[in-house]
Amino acid sequence: MFLHINIGMIFFAVILIYVVICVFIYFNKKHIVGYEVMEGSLSSNNIYEAVALRSETIVPSDHAGYVNYFATEGQRVAVGNLVCTIDESGDLLELLKSQGSEQAPLTDEDYSELRTQIVSYSSSFSPKTFSSVYDFKNSLDGTVQKLSSASALQNIGELNSSSALQSINYCYAPVTGIVLYSIDGYENLTLHDLNADLLDSEKYEKNQLISNSLLGVGDNAYKISTSEEWSIVIKENDLDKVKDLYEREYVKVRFLKNQDESWGKVDYYTDDAGDTFVSFTFTNSMLTFSKERFLNVEIITEEESGLKIPNSAVANKSFFVVPKSYIIKGSTGNNGVLRDKYDENGNETSEFIEVEIYNETEDSYYIDDSTLRSGDIILMTDSSEKYTLSVKDTLVGVYNINKGYPDFRQISVLYQNDEYSIVKSNTNYGLSVFDYIVLDASTVDNNLSADEQVESSEESSEESSEESGELDTSEEN
């Protein structure tokens, strides 16, 4: 009985095994992925919910009746400007209706004010604070009624002079400031009055003052913010951080609502419960945020700009430190050293070893240790002096793959957070914008030559742009 062996089947089986092994090795091997270096910035920052404290004066009503507001909320009024009217009899609305004035036409400026208010709220809305919808509704109702009242004001003079209506009282601003139509109990608070509950926006309650509502004598009619100096206060129980902020005296604050930035003077206070509150006092921007009691802010203590790279790309590498006098130019113009050697007959001779320079000091060069070994002796040209390679130093850098293989480049780190580093651009032996570097430095095998690394780099070249784009959009600062 003869065993018939099919050569084709054996060949196919060998190829199949080879393919399976290659696929297994491929998926278990770390591949070099590129990252495009771009300019960017990082900030050492913290985001807080802050409470705004202002110099606010509540103006009580001198009369009882129905209030109608005419001054625009959040805008400055001068002493003597009309803010509102108090209708003692309540007959004003009926008289306006009888004369066909219950539907007041709105101008383009009026519609613009309403659109601005709606867009502003939409941009800051969060489902986590849905209760703010009711404040917005009341505020919008007040604005509509104010605009309607402003139109009706044109007819009040004639109505008030008639015998039909003699009960309109005009309320004028007693001081110069920003007029506001809400009362929340924070009007007279200072830094030393605060506690944890007052900084909890979920416990915050505000009474929105609405046109056509009934007021009694002494009731709160409106309030005026009288000073451009104002503060925001955050809660921070990390005493080291508080001390650092206080020692800086002035700190940059970014308001997340509109990305405006301003420098605030720092102060702090610790209450009896052990909670520490830090205030930042400003002399501008009060008008912009006059209607806001709670603000999301970013406290910026450090900010650097430069080349933005992921921390995973940063690596440490050792290099020989060689006196500059031992580095020479080869016939091709490349840098190198003369290494001492002996021929087959035992005669002393030398060979040119090409090296790449990765850094320099006043007296020395840093050269790669891949082609040289500790103990090698190098010669100085036109001299009998020799130098034994032994001194090494470590550089911090990344692997540049512009040439298709990982090539170490030193970096100077300006600032670093948990994910990214900002490094100087256009430094000697360093990086420039649009360079491609290895995303994960641990994928580089320093024991391989440049040629052996080329294939691994080329396999992932198509992934570089995509990965770079993903990383660039993962964090913005």
Image (tube, grey):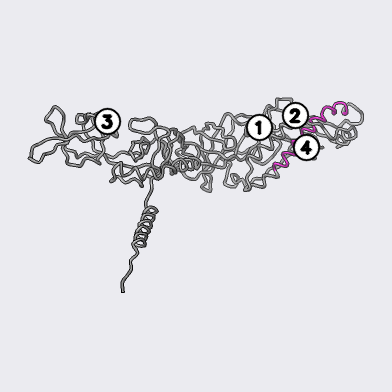
Provide the secondary structure element on which disc 1 rests. strand
Mark 1 → mark 4, Cα distance in angstroms: 20 Å
Q: Is residue 59 left or right of residue 316?
A: right
Mark 1 residue type: Ser
Q: Secondary structure at mark 2?
A: helix
The residue shown at (23%, 38%) is 320
Of residues 310 and 287, the one drawn nearer to the viewer in this rendering: 310
Comparing labels 1 and 2, the label whose residue is closer to the camera: 2
The stretch in magenta equals 135-159
Task: Provide residue 270's location: percent of width, then percent of height.
Answer: 51, 43
The residues tagged by marks 2 and 4 sit, at their Cα atoms, a distance apart of: 22 Å
Label 1 crowd (10 A; few <14 / some 14-19 / many >=20): many
Question: Which one is closest to the eye, mark 1 or mark 4?
Answer: 4
Judging by the rendered image, the residue that carries numbered circle 3 is 361
Q: Which callout, 1 or 3, points to the residue nearer the camera?
A: 3
Rendered image quadrant of residue 117: top right
Discs 1, 3 touching: Cβ within 8 Å: no
Mark closer to the chain start, 1 or 4: 4
* Mark drawn on residue 108: 2
Residue furthest to the right: 163
Spatial separation of the CA atoms under disc 1 and disc 2: 28 Å
Label 4, on which residue?
211
Q: Residues within 10 Å of mark 3 (few under 14, many from 20)?
A: few
